[in-house]
């Protein structure tokens, strides 16, 4: 089948699925749509590369696969999630917004135009904001507002970058700009730097990260998984496409390092496990940005990190959602003895925690290892030492807290039932599988 | 500079005055009226540029700015003002100090960001000299400052729309981006304001919440 038709299908399927809203069958239709999106994504691989209305390379496809996979997992998880507990949003409204959210992410990834990529990223904010206030508490409303206003201001900056790119190249077509000879100029360098601040806000880079822990910790669980697992990587992809116009290595490495350092420090004193995982997402984005910036085997490492992060972090948020549902508590110190009473959830939480902090042989470990090799080859010894130290700090912080929650004394909580018990575990195990496959391929 | 160029400079200056006016209003309704005026001014500048450059796209752009931002956005904002809309005011203190800090922000916009970076790198604008690009920069900084200095949801939305107005001006003066992009931006902003208005209905003020610290 023609590649363009497949891409149109990818964007259209989640949108068309929303018709199910009017017939009260959206929950089932959305799961079917998510499955179809994953199938079409897999089919699309044989049609790569694409450069017309859409621009797709192997890298784009990897990001599409992340979005499609986490979309399916979140759609399935949500099926059970909304049967348990009271929400201020109906399940059908949630699914309808989630479908539009996924469609805008796919659009941002595939469109062959920097201006429309910007519009797509802005549209992800519009479609996802209401997912944060599934329960209308003062905290979730504040988190929603911070998300809207901080990200929107960041994207105003990003639009300056789009205008400057158009001023220089007189086109916004990605494939044309990336194949233009002699792209580097002072004005383009400024455009790329402004994009780092603007789009970087959506990626959660330090110091523009302030919306991220609030939104991730307050959103409904399936939305948290989508935010962390695929929204941040989608924004990172758009930033990377702008970076490729005129790579500003030093600046990008500096922001990546600052993000890793600060996220690791923030993680050491978090009281809420969801906020802790949110900062872990920020750290993962810093590592991925570092890998993409230094290129070569580092870029391959970054893709592996992002892929494993998607599943690992989605698993972590699903498991966190189960814990919150069962205990009603967000504080790390208030939750103990999960393994004694919630074996599936506890196992998923522990595995996800190990996955996102880069324990071997999970995918993030393999990806980070490739990035370290590249840093060593480029003689970035000081940067490597800094990254290693702070990643170890993050590893200890997160896993010590999760160990307390899983293996601590007590344990009278009730395990969740149905798909909610198995989706987190499946997600964490896929992250492990990515690592094993990566080892086999590299070996 | 010809008379049309001079008129555009004058209207840009009035646009900045409208930004300062908005900044100094404690009443939300006055702020909304201020953003209507500002959007209409941006629309009029777009019409003049259509005449000056002989490009009909600018007419459509001007109509979009006036209809979508000057009318539709303002309608959504006014609808969400609680109680007696003409009496609803934000509990602000020290508007004169706000004005001074706003001047500093405008100064940063002009001198640090514009003159040290863009003035040198951008040799020409679509009208007048490249100094005209300083106006959208200052407007953007004032919009951001409005967001930073206020705790009320509606006031912050007005700041966001002001920032978006500055992007329209920048696009007009630097290089008119393809119309499809402009249209996408307009639709995004409208949708964003609608979503923000939904939040504003539930929560009018934004103060520090202990659970969201750190």
Image (cartoon, rainbow, N blue to C red):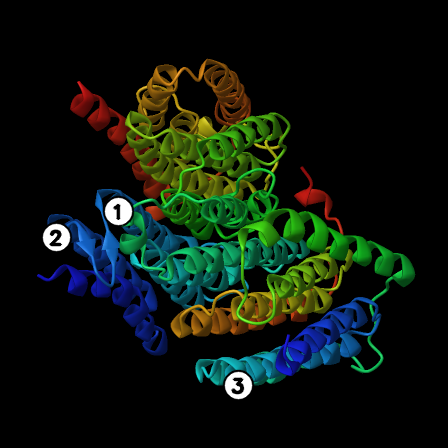
Quarter where residue A266 is shown: top right
Q: Can residue A192 be seen at all in this image of the molecule?
A: yes
Q: Is residue A16 above or below residue A201?
A: below
The residue under the point 78% across, 81% down is B85
Chain ID for label 3?
Answer: B
Residue with the most extreme front position: B1
The residue singled out by tag 2 in the image is A47
Quadrant where the C terminus of chain B sits is: top right
Chain ID for label 1?
Answer: A
Mark 1 packing: few (<14 Cα in 10 Å), some, or many (20+)?
many
Cα distance between the residues tagged 1 and 2: 14 Å
Q: Is residue B162 above or below residue A237?
A: below
Where residue B17 appears, x then y in whole percent? 77, 72
Q: Secondary structure at mark 2?
A: helix
Where residue A262 appears, x then y in whole percent? 59, 29
The residue under the point 21% across, 61% down is A52
The residue singled out by tag 1 in the image is A65
Where residue A356 appears, x then y in whole percent? 41, 30
Q: Secondary structure at mark 1?
A: helix
Say which of marks 3 and 1 sits in front: 3
Chain ID for label 2?
Answer: A
In the picture provided, is B179 more to the left or to the right than A110? right
The residue singled out by tag 3 in the image is B51
């Amino acid at each position: 089948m023609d590649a363009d038709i497949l891409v149109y299908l990818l964007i259209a399927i989640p949108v068309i699925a929303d018709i199910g809203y009017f017939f009260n069958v959206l929950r089932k239709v959305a799961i079917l749509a998510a499955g179809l999106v994953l199938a079409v994504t897999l089919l699309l691989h044989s049609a790569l590369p694409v450069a017309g209305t859409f621009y797709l390379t192997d890298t784009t496809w990897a990001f599409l696969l992340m979005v499609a996979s986490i979309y399916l997992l979140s759609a399935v998880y949500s099926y059970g999630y909304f049967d348990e507990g009271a929400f201020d949003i109906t399940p059908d409204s949630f699914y309808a917004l989630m479908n539009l959210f996924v469609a805008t992410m796919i659009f941002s990834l595939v469109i062959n135009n920097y201006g429309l990529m910007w519009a797509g990223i802005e549209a992800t904010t519009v479609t996802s904001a209401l997912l944060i206030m599934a329960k209308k508490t003062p905290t979730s409303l504040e988190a929603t507002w911070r998300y809207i206003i901080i990200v929107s201001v960041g994207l105003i900056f990003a639009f300056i970058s789009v205008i400057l790119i158009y001023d220089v190249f007189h086109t916004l077509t990605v494939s044309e700009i990336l194949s233009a000879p002699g792209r580097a100029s002072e004005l383009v360098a400024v455009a790329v730097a402004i994009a780092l601040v603007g789009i970087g806000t959506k990626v959660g880079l330090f110091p523009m990260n302030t919306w991220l822990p609030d939104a991730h910790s307050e959103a409904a669980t399936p939305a948290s998984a989508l935010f962390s697992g695929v929204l941040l990587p989608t924004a990172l992809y758009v930033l990377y496409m702008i970076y490729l116009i005129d790579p500003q290595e030093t600046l990008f490495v500096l922001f990546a390092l600052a993000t890793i350092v600060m996220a690791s420090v923030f993680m050491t004193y978090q009281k809420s496990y969801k906020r802790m995982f949110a900062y872990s997402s920020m750290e993962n984005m810093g590592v991925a940005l570092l890998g993409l910036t230094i290129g070569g085997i580092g870029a391959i490492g970054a893709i592996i990190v992002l892929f494993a992060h998607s599943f690992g972090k989605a698993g972590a948020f699903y498991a966190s959602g189960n814990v919150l549902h069962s205990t009603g508590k967000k504080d790390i110190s208030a939750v103990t003895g999960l393994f004694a009473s919630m074996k599936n959830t506890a196992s998923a939480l522990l595995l996800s925690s190990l996955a996102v902090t880069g324990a071997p042989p999970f995918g993030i470990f393999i990806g980070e290892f490739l990035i370290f090799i590249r840093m060593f080859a480029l003689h970035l010894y000081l940067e490597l030492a800094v990254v290693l130290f702070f990643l170890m700090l993050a590893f200890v912080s997160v896993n010590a807290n999760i160990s307390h929650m899983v293996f601590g004394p007590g344990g009278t909580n009730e395990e969740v039932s149905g798909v909610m018990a198995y989706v987190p575990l499946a997600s964490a195990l896929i992250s492990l599988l990515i690592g094993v496959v990566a080892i086999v391929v590299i070996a | 500079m010809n008379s049309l160029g001079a008129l555009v400079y004058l209207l840009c200056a009035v646009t900045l005055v409208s930004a300062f006016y908005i900044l100094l209003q404690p009443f939300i309704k006055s702020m909304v009226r201020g953003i209507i005026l500002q959007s209409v001014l941006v629309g009029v500048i777009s019409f003049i540029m259509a005449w000056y450059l002989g490009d009909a796209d600018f007419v459509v752009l001007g109509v979009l700015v006036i209809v979508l931002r000057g009318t539709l956005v303002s309608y959504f904002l006014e609808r969400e003002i609680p109680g007696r809309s003409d009496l609803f005011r934000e509990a602000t203190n020290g508007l004169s100090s706000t004005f001074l800090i706003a001047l500093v922000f405008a100064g940063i916009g002009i001198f640090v960001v514009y003159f040290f970076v863009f003035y040198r790198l951008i040799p020409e604008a679509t009208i007048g000299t490249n100094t005209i690009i300083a106006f959208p920069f200052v407007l953007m900084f004032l919009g951001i400052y409005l967001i930073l200095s206020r705790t009320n949801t509606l006031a912050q939305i007005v700041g966001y729309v002001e920032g978006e107005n500055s992007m329209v001006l920048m696009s007009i003066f630097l290089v008119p981006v393809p119309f499809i992009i402009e249209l996408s931006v307009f639709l995004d902003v409208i949708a964003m304001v609608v979503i923000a208005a939904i939040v504003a209905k539930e929560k009018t003020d934004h103060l520090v919440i202990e659970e969201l610290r750190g």
